[in-house]
Amino acid sequence: MAKEKTYPMTEAGREKLQKELSELKTKTRPEVIERTKIARGFGDLSENSEYESAKDEQSMVESRISTVEQMLQNAEIIDNNAVDEDVVSLGKVVEFKELPDEDPESYTIVGAAEADPMSGKISNDSPIAKALLDHKVGDEVVISTPGGDMHVQILKVSVSE
């Protein structure tokens, strides 16, 4: 039997998913079901674009509910206390600079379920995070990217808020 995929995440990430699931089940799903009922009343279903659109939306909502439920069921909550405080790991903020003298950058490394690059949260599956994981403050690391290798130095590691 195949092992279930686990979804590493912070406690805050799990809470965010639980909130999303609640919203999907209590608000979004009933709204879509109501739109489907209304569209069904517009006549011949074979030529009813509103009905098709509502059914498509309902399918997407049900799919997302299923995905979020699976992620929560197989969540692996990150314990930052299990790793030295100056070691890069999931749930920590890492500040580094590209060598020789670029400006520092800072990212929080999270599981794929809660990644949001626009707010500085990168997935542990990303090339940057994969290269930085398990390294310490002061380490120089080579990050392989599609645009070529980046040589960086880790400046600071702290626990995510």
Image (cartoon, rainbow, N blue to C red):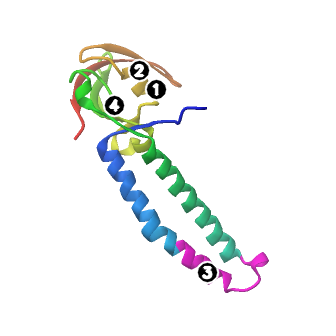
Identify the element where label 1 is drawn.
helix
Label 2 or label 4, whichever lies nearer to me, is 4
* 3D distance between C-alphas at marks 2 and 4: 13 Å
Say left or right for 64 vs 96. Answer: right
Dot 2 and dot 3 residues touching (CB under 8 Å): no
The residue under label 2 is 131
* 3D distance between C-alphas at marks 4 and 1: 14 Å
Q: Is residue 31 above or below residue 149?
A: below
The residue under label 1 is 127
Q: Amino acid at mark 4?
A: Leu
The residue under label 3 is 37
Q: Which residues are magenta?
A: 32-48
Q: Is residue 65 above or below residue 90?
A: below
Q: Which comes sooner in the sequence, label 2 or label 4?
A: 4
The residue at the point 36 percent across, 15 percent down is 141
Label 3: few (<14), some (14–19) or many (≥20) C-alpha neighbours in 10 Å: some
Identify the element where label 3 is drawn.
helix
Magenta run includes residue 44: yes
Q: What percent of the width, then of the height, locates residue 142? A: 41, 15
Label 4: few (<14), some (14–19) or many (≥20) C-alpha neighbours in 10 Å: many
Q: Amino acid at mark 1?
A: Pro
The residue under label 4 is 90
* 3D distance between C-alphas at marks 2 and 3: 51 Å
Dot 1 and dot 2 residues touching (CB under 8 Å): yes
